[in-house]
Amino acid sequence: MVGGISALVFLVFGKYISADIGILASMITGILLTGAFHEDGFADTCDGFGGGWTKEKILQIMKDSRIGVFGAIGLFSILSAKFLLLKELPQYNPDLGHPGSNIFFNSRYFVLTVMAAHSLSRLMPVWVIQFSRYVSEPDTSKSKPIANKKLSIADLILAALFALLPFTFLSWHFLLAILPVIYATYGLKKYFEKWIGGYTGDCLGAIQQVTEIVFYLSVITIWRFII
C-alpha cells in the first residue's frame, strides 16, 4: 500500500510538473505515510554503531532522541541514494517504442517495482524478528508492540506471499533481485548480533531502508546487464 500510493503520487507530479519533482513527492509521501518510522530507526542505528564501541554505549546512544553526526550523514546519504536510484527506474519500459495514452499503463513497471521494493524490504525485518533476539528493554522501547513477537508459520507465509505479490506481474528475471536483498539482511543481522547480541527496533528500520536501496540497485543492474 505504501509503495502503491507513493508511486501514484509520482505519476501525478511527474505528469504535470516534472519527473524529479514526482520522485521527491513520492519519497515525501512514503515518509509521511509511515511517520518516518524506518528513517528514524536508520538514523539512530547510524548514530549508535558509529559512536559506540560497546553494547551498552551503542544502546544508550540509540535511545537518545537527538540525531547526531553519523545519523545526519547516514540519513542524507540514503535519501540521496534513493532519489538517484528512483530517477533511473522510469527509464525501464519494454514498450517504450509503442507507448500508450494511459500514463498508468506506460508507467506500470515503475509502479510495480516500487511496490515490490516497499513490500520486500518490509518483509526482511519480519524474518529478523523470527530468527534473532530482541536486546532492548521492552518496557522502555519505542517498538514495544513488536518486541519479541514471533509470527506463526501461517502468518509468516502470508506475509511472504503479500511481499512477493508484485513480482507476479514482472519479468521472472527480477526475482534475482531478491538474492542480494536476503544477503544484505543476513549481513546486517550478523553485524548487529556481533555488536549488541541481537536487534532493536531501530535496527529493523535500518534493515528496511538498506534493503530497499539494495533492491533498487539490483533491479537496475538486472535491467541493464541481464534482460
Image: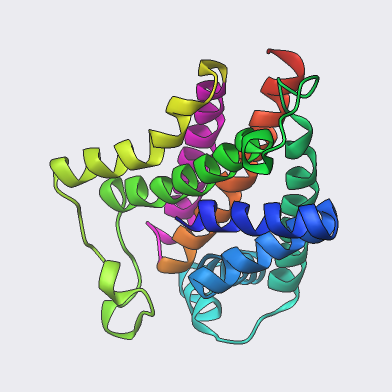
Is residue 45 shown left or right of residue 216? left
Establish if 177 lies above or below 186. Answer: above
Which secondary structure class fits the magenta region best?
helix
Query: Is 176 a magenta residue?
Result: yes
Query: Is 185 a magenta residue?
Result: yes
Is residue 2 shown left or right of residue 106? left
- How far across and how far down the image is residue 39, in percent? 59, 67
Residue located 55% across and 38% down the image: 112
Q: Which residues are magenta?
A: 174-200
User: Which of the 4 image quarters holds residue 14?
Assistant: bottom right
Is residue 154 shown left or right of residue 99? left
Q: Nearer the viewer, residue 132 or 123?
A: 123
Residue located 68% across and 34% down the image: 106
Residue located 72% across and 69% down the image: 70
Quadrant including the C terminus: top right
Q: Is residue 59 visible?
A: yes
Is residue 62 shown left or right of residue 129? right
Establish if 207 lies above or below 214. Answer: below
Q: Nearer the viewer, residue 9 or 27?
A: 9
Q: How is the image coloured?
A: rainbow
Q: Farthest residue toward the top?
A: 226
- How far across and how far down the image is residue 88, in percent? 79, 39
- How far across and how far down the image is residue 137, in percent? 31, 77
Q: Nearer the viewer, residue 134 or 220?
A: 220
Q: Nearer the viewer, residue 183 or 93?
A: 93
Q: Is residue 40 visible?
A: no
Establish if 148 lies above or below 3. Answer: below
Residue located 23% across and 38% down the image: 157
- How far across and how far down the image is residue 103, in percent? 69, 42
